[in-house]
Amino acid sequence: MHKKLFIPGPTEVRKEILDAQSQWMIGHRTKDFGELYHRCVTKTAEALGTKHHVMWFSSSGTGCMEGAIRNTVDTKVLHCVGGAFAERWFKISGLCGKQATRIDVDWGKAVKPEMIDAELAKGGYCAVAITQNETSTGVRQPTEDIAKMMKDKYPDVLILVDAVSSLMGDWFEIDDLGLDVVVASSQKAVALPPGLGVSVVSPRAYEKSLTLADRGFYFNWEPMMKRYEKDHQTPTTPAISLFWALDLELDSILKETMKGRYERHLEMAKFTQEWVKKHFALFAEPGYESVTLTTADNNKGINVADLNKQLAEKGLQISNGYGKQLKEKTFRIAHMGDLTVDDMKEVTGAIEQILGL
Ligand SMILES: Cc1ncc(COP(=O)(O)O)c(C=O)c1O
């Protein structure tokens, strides 16, 4: 039975997009694939309003997070940690042999520019890694304010952004803010099945990557860019079916416009957050609520696993809290991708009915 997904990835995928994947296979060393990949790259850049390099990898977003570190960090990287995914990125840097330090805030809180300023003032940093949308806590980190502070005071330090669960739903100016690397996954606000990751890379970050010795193979930007410049193809075999789906979804995004898509996401976020405030409480620090998902503080002590079982009977699914720390203590309702306010009314209405709210 089809369950409509209100989980923060994979998100609900329209049938038309699923069907786009079922064309006859083509070779990836063909003009047809080069044209398909080129359309995906150019339409992504157009939707995001960026002149930076766009690379779509056949991997989940974590690969692109690792790539961001391996292609840019030579001295020290500062991680801003307030949830599970920022924690993961910090771990990745260590496993890649990088010198990584961290700022920690309580889960549910945002990392403020002044905290980063105080750490960067100590010197020796080449990059700061920010989880723009922390999917475990529902916190939107103040990336715009952080970027403005860094542009003023630390213009040479690169800004690496995990926008895995927000890109193409939430809106932020990549080029004007000077974000050097922005990474995301296909199965979140892009509203595709899992399997693709995107890296949006500033010219200066790309130039820097060419000077680093230990970039590995798969997520090394240089072969991606070289092959793209040659014939619009990718160095290794891409997930061709997903690119058909992406091509079609990007047409919808461009038709709706990113402004329209962002406004729809804001409307869904406002509706869901008001609903959560009425019946529970928000987990995110006030003023830093995510645009693409809401984490509810389970202050009524409901059984979230049971609720989800009953929602499943109605063809709906939300998400429990993330990991041991937040499971049953919170629950998450995603409002990203191609969902609408009517969908949010459907899922919150069903929860009210089940819980007798
Ligand atoms: C903020 C954030 N970063 C990174 C990831 C990892 O992405 P993926 O599962 O596509 O590797 C996720 C996945 O939920 C996420 O929400």
Image (cartoon, rainbow, N blue to C red):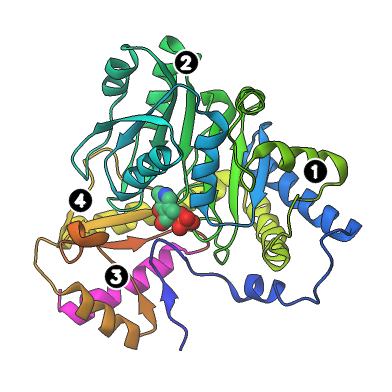
Compute the Cα span from label 2 to label 3.
41 Å
Report the label total.
Answer: 4
Q: If you read the primary sequence from the N terminus, does the residue marked by circle 4 or circle 1 appear first? A: 1
- Residue range highlighted in magenta: 339-357
Is 278 rendered above or below residue 5? above
**In the image, residue 166 lies at what x, y percent?**
46, 48
Q: Write down the residue under mark 4.
A: 283
Q: Write down the residue under mark 3.
A: 348
Q: Write down the residue under mark 1.
A: 227
User: Where's the N terminus, which quadrant?
Assistant: bottom left
Residue plotted at (26% across, 41% down) = 82
Q: If you read the primary sequence from the N terminus, does the residue marked by circle 2 or circle 3 appear first? A: 2
Compute the Cα span from label 4 to label 2.
31 Å
Under circle 3, the secondary element is: helix
Compute the Cα span from label 3 to label 4.
17 Å
Callout in the foreground (3, 4): 4
Under circle 1, the secondary element is: helix
The answer to whether the residue labelled 4 contacts the one labelled 1, judged by CB atoms less than 8 Å apart, is no
